[in-house]
Amino acid sequence: MRPSGDTGRSVLWFRRDLRLHDHPALFAAVARGSVAPLFVFDPRLLSGRFASPNRLWFMTESLRTLDGELRARGSQLHFRVGNPAVVVPAFAREASASTIFASRDYTPFARRRDVAVRVGLARDGVTFSLSPGHLARAPQHVLNAQGLPYRVFTPFSKAWAGVQTRTVLRAPASVSHLAGMDAGDIPAVFDIRPTAAEMPEPGETAARNRLARWASGGLDRYADLRDRPDIDGTSGLSTDLRWGLLSPVEVLERCAGTTESHRRFRLELAWREFFAHLLWHFPNVASEALRERYRRVAWAEDAGGLAAWKAGMTGYPIVDAGMRQLLATGWMHNRARMITASFLVKDLLIDWREGERFFMEHLFDGDVASNNGGWQWAASTGADSQPYFRVFNPVLQGKKFDPEGVYVRRWVPELRGVATGRVHEPWLAGGAPGYPPPIVDHAMARERTLAAFKQAERAAAGRTG
Ligand SMILES: Cc1cc2nc3c(=O)[nH]c(=O)nc-3n(C[C@H](O)[C@H](O)[C@H](O)COP(=O)(O)OP(=O)(O)OC[C@H]3O[C@@H](n4cnc5c(N)ncnc54)[C@H](O)[C@@H]3O)c2cc1C
């Protein structure tokens, strides 16, 4: 059926914005009249390069709570399965909708998908309306004086902070329902168990409680504690932001304040947007180094090293603690992410894309842009990343950021009997039962990496010079 002009009926297509509060697309749909809320299970999520049982579980459970919230407002979520390019136009016909509302998503995959959906809808004369929601400021609004994207974080963050954000919107009190449509079910293949033993509580209400606790508590000490993996000193909001259980505009508003902790926290949210903007402007970073000169580093083939890293058995306590935290909880402290990523790339000389994929397999907050940005930062291949000759020493990092060894003992129980003075270098205390000796010599590994990066630079200069 072709909608003839404005039917006043619309579809709200949820993707990674599984909330009712501060949701501009939902707000616009509700303002127009009756709405059919939709979620499409795309089978590509099950088998893609970055598929993850942890994230699928979290998403599915958050969808159940979203459905409950919609029912409490007189509506419900409709579930469909298949390629959105086919399924969304079909659903629009079912609903006799003249407009599909959604929040804009910025990844290369989402952009291709949305172009295909737009083409399908246009054939039926249906409008596809994309609203902000995933970021506080859109990539098109944060450009330098030449109208080009920033590649350096500090000027980006200043320009970003200077762009006006929209006002926070309330959740609709009721959603006018389109009666008579089949609700559909969550398909059994998507009803997956997480691999993590400890999971964050899914759903918007849990996320809002976490935000409230953070804004009125932990945030005050953020500047002092944010770099300490042994202390619960960060917000733990990354998964909520990843799935849009919270809107970044609302998080910024709730965390407005003038202390160093408030400022620092907003800067971290700016990193999230910096990486999202970079991926929007340079979609090729999803598969290759942003800096051309490091596209041909001669990475090592080291299956044993990669397996030891993945299992948290490298013999370097702070690296192994981080990896085991990831396996057990699907989350890792930022400092540990930086250390473990640096170790894979700079101590084992393994291609950063191996690490990127493994993180995406496990992280509840796994986000193509932030994860890619973090990996390219650690590998020295990205925008404003750490220079390649700055190589983290895993022992010194451990001593500095986990001074009492609390973090390493929590995640690597083999080390519980090792004295604090030696806990980051247990080989000096004769080792620990069941715990391996270091799989590489850090000083030698560092030299090998410097040589490999220099070689890549020479090769790049030779090609262009
Ligand atoms: C190799 C590597 C991979 C990473 N992969 C991801 C990922 O897949 N998804 C993800 O959300 N973050 C990723 N990060 C960034 C960061 O580690 C996490 O966002 C942070 O640890 C989440 O914990 P939190 O919410 O308590 O952070 P907080 O310290 O409380 O920070 C607040 C919020 O700011 C954002 N943020 C903080 N630091 C960064 C950063 N360096 N880059 C981008 N956003 C940031 C997050 O949304 C976070 O929730 C990665 C970092 C590295 C080094």
Image (cartoon, grey):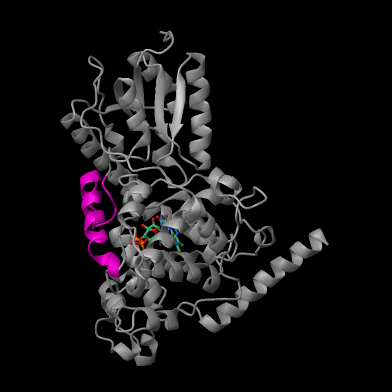
Q: Where is residue 71 in the image (x, y as percent from the top left)?
A: 18, 29
Q: Which residue lies furthest to the left in this view?
A: 72
Q: In which quarter of the image is the C terminus?
A: bottom right
Give yes or no for residue 329 being in the magenta stretch. no
Front one among 127 and 216: 216
Front one among 260 and 427: 260
Which residues are drawn in magenta? 193-220
Evaluate whether residue 364 shows in this view.
no
Q: Which residue lies furthest to the right in this view?
A: 465
Q: Where is residue 320 in the image (x, y as percent from the top left)?
A: 37, 72
Front one among 462 and 20: 20
Q: Which residue is drawn at 26% across and 24% down?
A: 184
Look at the picture and state if 461 lies above or below 448: above
Q: Which residue is drawn at 38% across and 63% down?
A: 265
Q: Quadrant of residue 319?
A: bottom left
Q: In terms of image quarters, where does ligand 1 lie?
A: bottom left
Evaluate whether residue 284 shows in this view.
yes
Q: Which residue is drawn at 30% across and 81% down?
A: 405
Give yes or no for residue 212 being in the magenta stretch. yes
Q: Residue at x 44, y 64 (%)?
A: 307
Q: Quadrant of residue 3?
A: top left
Specify whether 119 is left or right of 318.
Answer: right
Specify whether 313 is left or right of 111.
Answer: left
Specify whether 370 is left or right of 458.
Answer: left
